[in-house]
Amino acid sequence: MFNKNLTFATVILLVVLIMYGLRLGIYLFIREHKSNSFRNKINNERKNSSDMSFSGKCSTWIGCASIYACEVSPLFFRLSNGTPDNMMAYLGMIIAILGFLFESIGDQQKFNAKKKNPTSFVSSGLYKYVRCPNYLGEILVWTGVFLSGITSYKNIWQWTISLFGYLCILSVMLSAVRSLEGRQNKAYGNDKKYQEYIKKTPIIIPFVPIYTFGAKVKV
């Protein structure tokens, strides 16, 4: 459909998104079958949603699918509008690649650390520099996708759809960071090493002195 409009940057971005989807699916599958705590969490969520009506489930599925479609729309608009590669396309491509690597490495390092010591918080690897490197990677992936399409939007609707998708995933990830902070505060709040760790390690952006999203620290 878009063979004639494919460029180096769009091909790389497509590959990154395909790898992103495959990696996330495989990681969650392995985590569900190897992590008892994660499996219990998933089972509880399934029980909680069992009373939801079919129409409610369909609305949720359609809503999630629509948001994902909006998230990838910058790439679609770049292809459909036939926009050639430029600096924004290359910048977005580089940011998306870095985000994918950050997220993949962060997830793997956490998985390995939890395998060795399931009851301890993770502070090694990328976690020495930022407390949520996997969430940061997710944000970078979609920031790169959004930026790659900025010079290709032709009307207000393309801008609106793309911006809506980006703001949705940004809101979801920042909410996830705050939720994780609360769970970790509850689990490790009495650990002096954890208290020292969160006071000196930024929560989401390395070297930027933002250490909390407001979740209370259990002391």
Image (tube, rainbow, N blue to C red):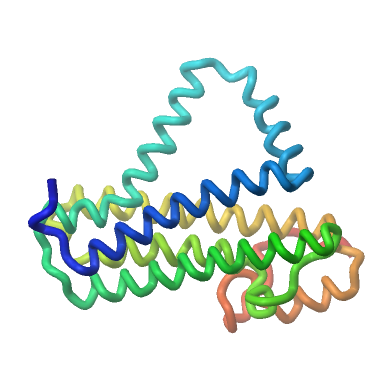
Tell me if residue 91 comes above or below residue 138 in the rendering. below
Q: Is residue 94 left or right of residue 73?
A: right
Instruction: Work out which quarter of the rendered image holds the C terminus and state it.
Output: bottom right
Residue at the farthest bottom position: 207
Q: In percent of the image, x 66 and y 48: which residue is there?
A: 31
Q: In percent of the image, x 74 and y 73: which residue is there?
A: 123
* Percent of width and height locating residue 146: 32, 61
Total number of numbered labels? 0
Q: In percent of the image, x 45 and y 30: which residue is there?
A: 61
Tell me if residue 164 comes above or below residue 185 in the rendering. above
Tell me if residue 47 comes above or below residue 171 in the rendering. above
Pick the front one: 96 or 29: 29
Instruction: Work out which quarter of the rendered image holds the N terminus and state it.
Output: top left
* Percent of width and height locating residue 195: 83, 73
Q: Is residue 81 left or right of residue 71?
A: left
* Percent of width and height locating residue 93: 32, 70
* Percent of width and height locating residue 51: 63, 17
Pick the front one: 83 or 59: 83
Q: In percent of the image, x 44 and y 26: which residue is there?
A: 59
